[in-house]
Image (tube, rainbow, N blue to C red):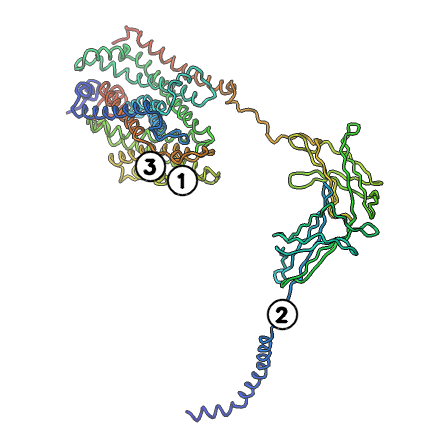
Amino acid sequence: MKTDIFINIQKNFKPVCLLLALICFISIPRVVAQDDSESESEPVKKVRPILKLLSNKYDDNSRTLIGIFSYKDTETREFFKVKGIALNFYAGVDSIVELGSFTTNEDGMAVCKINPEIKLPKDEEGYIHFSVEFEGNDFFRASDNELDLIDLELQLSLEILDSVKTVSVKAEKILANDERVPLTEVDLPIYVQRMFSQLKVGEITLDEGEGSFEFPNNVPGDTLGMVTIIAKFDDHEDYAYLRKSQSIDWGVVTSHHTIYHPRSLWTQVAPIWMIVTLSIMLLGVWGHYIFVMIEMVRLKKGPKETVQ
Amino acid sequence: MKKEFDASQLMKEFAPQLEKTSNLWYAVFFSMLAVFLFGVFGLYTQIADGHIVTGMRDNIVWGVYIVNFIFFMGLSYAGALISGILHLFKSEWRAPIMRMAELITIISLVIGPVFILFCIGRLDRLPFLVMYPRIQSPITWDVIAISTDLFGCIIFLYLSFIEDFAKLRDYKDLKVPNWRKKLYKALALGYQDTPWHYKIISNAKNIMAAMVIAIAIIVYSVLAWIFGVTLQPGWHSTIFGPYFVIAAVYSGAGMLILLMWIFRKVYKLEEYITKKHFVNVGVILLILAAFYGYFTFSDYLTKWYGSIKMDKLLIDKLFSSKYYLLFIFSNYVGILLPILVVGIKKFRTITNITVAALVTVVALWVNRYLIVVPTLETPYFPIQEARESWLSYSATWVEWSLIAAGLAVFCMLFMLASKFVPIISISEMEKHAELPKGLIRK
């Protein structure tokens, strides 16, 4: 029995050895490479953030810069806003004005309200160069963004001219050295504020910085007829977000209290249908009662001759 | 020996009931009187100390008084409906139980509205309901409807008594005081057993039977609308009118079976009130149980499915928390037991049917409690900063004493009525009763 086993081993020795050698050849270099990779400490790969810069100019001519900090997760391909990131805001190219450092909130937004007292540097064409900068940290690479805008001033006036509700707009670019240049051949949309959004009611084509628009008579207002009329650029390449608004009682007066007919039950007089119904029922029933009582009287005074 | 089933024979049998009063009768009557006087003491306490002695507060303004009001009014309308329908359909078997149904109507109708008065804080303003009525007000409808119904039921009951009064007047061997004989004579209105007299009485009874059926339905619907027209959770329902009517007739049928059993035992009326009567009224009970179950299911299903917040809170209280045991008793046991007892022939005995009827009556009282109290404990607009004790209701001894007094008065009036007129209508028996085999009608 033992002899047979040895004979088999001898017969198969060469192929088995070759197979083992092949396995060793394939696997050993990999094991070595694995050991190498574990032994070397590779630096953590920083994420490249997405940094946006927006500018809003409001009714009181104040301007706000908004830096939005986010990143894209390469695995899930989702975008995430990051809270607690310090962003530095600047204005100007040659002579840089530091506007301040602000930290992003849970929406990834850092809001920089520019003090109107600050004189913002402008280039020859009147552009103001805004920039935002992130210095980088252990997880995110440094990043920045910039925006070149022209300072534009809008004036909105609402008046009734010849019984026509007229919205008039005057728009001037404020260039270097406070030089004012009228805006021309630009379409400016006009909106009315609604509860959840803004309704576009028309558009003014500015000519030499001025234009007007006939406000429609069928726009619903609040209980006093008040509407808020807005002239604005939403995301203009030169002016970014810029708005001017004013409230006036040009809307149709609306009442949120639906006019119901007062409940008849609570009035001094009962409704006719109720009086009629009740009268018929009572007359019907009491009529029968009276008839039966008359019959009872007849019974009392019944003919005696019929008595057996 | 051939038994003759005529008026004189019936008079001989029923006269002792009117002539003699047993010690047991006195014992029961005075026990009831004691309960009634205890209720009077409770009422005195309530008037002297105010409604603070009751469980009713600012949130729960109605309690067991209203429950008893609805319950007694239901019995009343049931009595009217059952007696009216049996009369119009001229059922052969109705004769022995007609008077009981009619007495249920009147006695309940007298007692029921009194419970409304117990709820009112300013009784001195009660005349305003009549002095300054507003047709728009459901309370005014109720006052008009109940007074109309009471008047109609009294006429109907009186019409059914006239022939018996005449027989009592003409029965020479009746050993009662002279004043009672004179009273019978006056109340008989000169009725004689002639076709002319019979025709008048018969026509009048037919008219009044139709009237009491219609009025019973309308009046109990009006009572339901007092709840249904309000925007309270659980009450604002379009089917409350028919639901109340069905529930009323259901409880009334149960009460009729109970009274049949009691008077059958007390006055030994086994020959007249037989198993057939119990089974027949039991079948009515079964049909009404099915209808009542259907209405109950329909009402709660739509409320539950709608899931309006306050309705859901109310239904949670009824189905799964505070009141679920009472709800199961009222709406499962109270419906299924009569159906099983009457529906399965093996269980269809007089005792079983009576027990099922007793359960029905109690279950329907509980049902009214579950309609009134949990809703008031689940208001749309709870009173701000209400005290904890105001938010749930529990009846006090004062209220229970008056409830017991109401039931005691119900029993006492029935006992007194059974001493004044035969509890089984002799004239009905003579004309319409199914005679035992071999007997002839003279």
Front of the two marks 3 and 2: 2
Q: What chain does badge 1 belong to?
A: B
* Quadrant of the image occupied by residue B162: top left
Q: Is residue B258 above or below residue B340?
A: above
Distance in Å between CA atoms under marks 1 and 2: 64 Å
Q: Which residue is mark 2?
A: A43
Q: Is residue B82 visible?
A: no
Locate residue A115, reporting x and y percent.
Answer: 71, 47
Considering the image in quadrants, where does the C terminus of chain A appear?
A: top left
Q: Residue A104 in the image: x percent, y percent?
A: 64, 53
- Determine which of the numbered discs, if any, sits on residue B317 in the image: 1
Alpha carbon separation for disc pair 3 and 1: 19 Å
Foreground pick, A238 / B25? A238
Q: Are marks 3 and 2 in contact (CB under 8 Å)?
A: no
Give the residue number, with chain letter if any, for mark 3: B334
Q: Residue, x 34% and y 29% (percent of image)?
A: B54
Please identify the residue farthest to the left as the structure is shown.
B1
Identify the secondary structure beneath mark 1: helix
